[in-house]
Image (cartoon, rainbow, N blue to C red):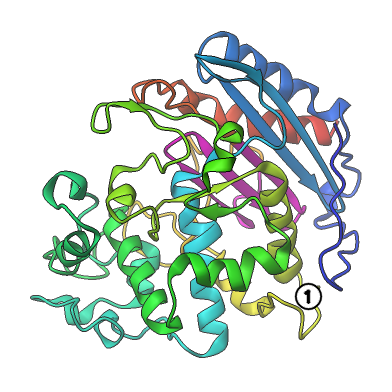
Amino acid sequence: MRWALVPFLSVVLLAHCGSESSLDWVLDRESLEPAQLLLQSSVESDAFPGAVLAVGLRDTVEIISVGQYGDNDPRPVTDSTVYDLASLTKVIGLTTAVMLLVADGAIDLDDPVDRYLPSFAGPGKDAVTIRHLLTHTAGLEAWRPLHLETETREEAIDSVMAATLQSVPGETYVYSDFGAITLGLVVEQVSGTTLDMFLSDRVFEPLGMRWTRYRPPAEWVDRIAPTELDPWREQVVRGEVHDENAARLEGVAGHAGLFSIAPDLARFARWILAAHHGRLPPGSEPFLPTQLVQNFTSRQPGPEGSTRALGWDTPSETGSSAGTMMSRSSSFGHTGFTGTSIWIDADSELFVILLTNRVHPTRENRALLEIRGPVADSVVVGVSR
């Protein structure tokens, strides 16, 4: 079904044509038929139990759903199905929080992390900046099984704070959950509240994203797509964050933990595009300056192998989950381990949001890695036909 975005607060999002090449693009149900067929065939080949695809072009949003909730839940997924966003948390949540605090003047990107977190200490760590954390160039290790090494949230945080650098800050790109966890703690220290409450108060409630949150309540469980049959928890995870380290951190962390639905994420994408193009009226909430958003969503100078903006990622030349047809100069996005992704082309004002639970019943199913890009390409072909 078509989902019409209700204007949030007093912000009127006017149609914006974007780049010359997208002037004649049209988004409707017919334009998404190739993507729908691709997703349906992927369900039939067991790439994932079900999927919800939200596509936006300027002032139009379309959402399609295919497949079912899970192996033992044959109900068809819909645009109200709640998915574990996994690492989309890093951009929808964490990066947005940092942008707001930078806009507030409460955080400076080039400040050392230990200015905000004195416990972030050890050889060379005084040179790690907020910018390093956002670009995954801090020199921190990628991951460690905190859920096995620690027993409490406090112990897990202490372990992250005490982690030693693996390389000199700024010299090496390593995608690091530890960096995102650290940055989430910076947000909490600066804001004086928990990360989930900050995002709820400053982002999700003002935007009307009422199905987006950490730690979903028990009454949401029937609407949540199950994730993995987890050996650690000895059950199919449903309604609890899939990421084990986020679970050890009691469900609230910078790197993972958010749950959401496709219409909420489409609302977020429309908002970030409005901010990117300077269409947010001063005084609206949440408000972000245009230059700040453009900076955060543009590829940053960095070490070899990095395609990172600030928090966000940008498309690589080959093998990108953004496909081959979205702009390499104006697109930004991210993926999530559970089978989620968001890509936004600022020039054409096209966005592609894909939600799946590809880790159900096992994370060993990696077929989605070969599907995300073709789905994005099929969308572009469809709207530009």
Left or right of 285, for residue 185:
left
Q: At which x and y percent is residue 364?
A: 34, 22
Compared to residue 266, the image places residue 140 above or below, namely: below
Q: At which x and y percent is residue 367?
A: 45, 20
Left or right of 48, for residue 173:
left
Q: At which x and y percent is residue 64?
A: 75, 29
Toward the bottom, the furthest residue is: 105
Indicate the quadrant containing the C terminus: top left, top right, bottom left or bottom right: top right
Q: How many marks?
A: 1
Identify the residue position indicated by label 1 in the image: 280
Q: Is residue 265 magenta?
A: no
Q: Quadrant of residue 126?
A: bottom left
Left or right of 207, for residue 185:
left
Q: Quadrant of residue 169?
A: bottom left
Toward the front, the furthest residue is: 219
Q: In the rendered structure, which segment of residues is drawn in magenta? A: 326-354
Q: Is residue 329 magenta?
A: yes
Indicate the quadrant containing the N terminus: top left, top right, bottom left or bottom right: top right
Residue at 58% over, 41% down: 220
Residue at 44% over, 58% down: 308
Q: Amino acid at mark 1?
A: Leu
Q: At which x and y percent is residue 132?
A: 33, 70
State whether residue 321 appears in this view.
no
Residue at 60% over, 22% down: 50
Compared to residue 379, the image places residue 229 above or below, namely: above
State whether residue 336 appears in this view.
yes
Residue at 81% over, 73% down: 279
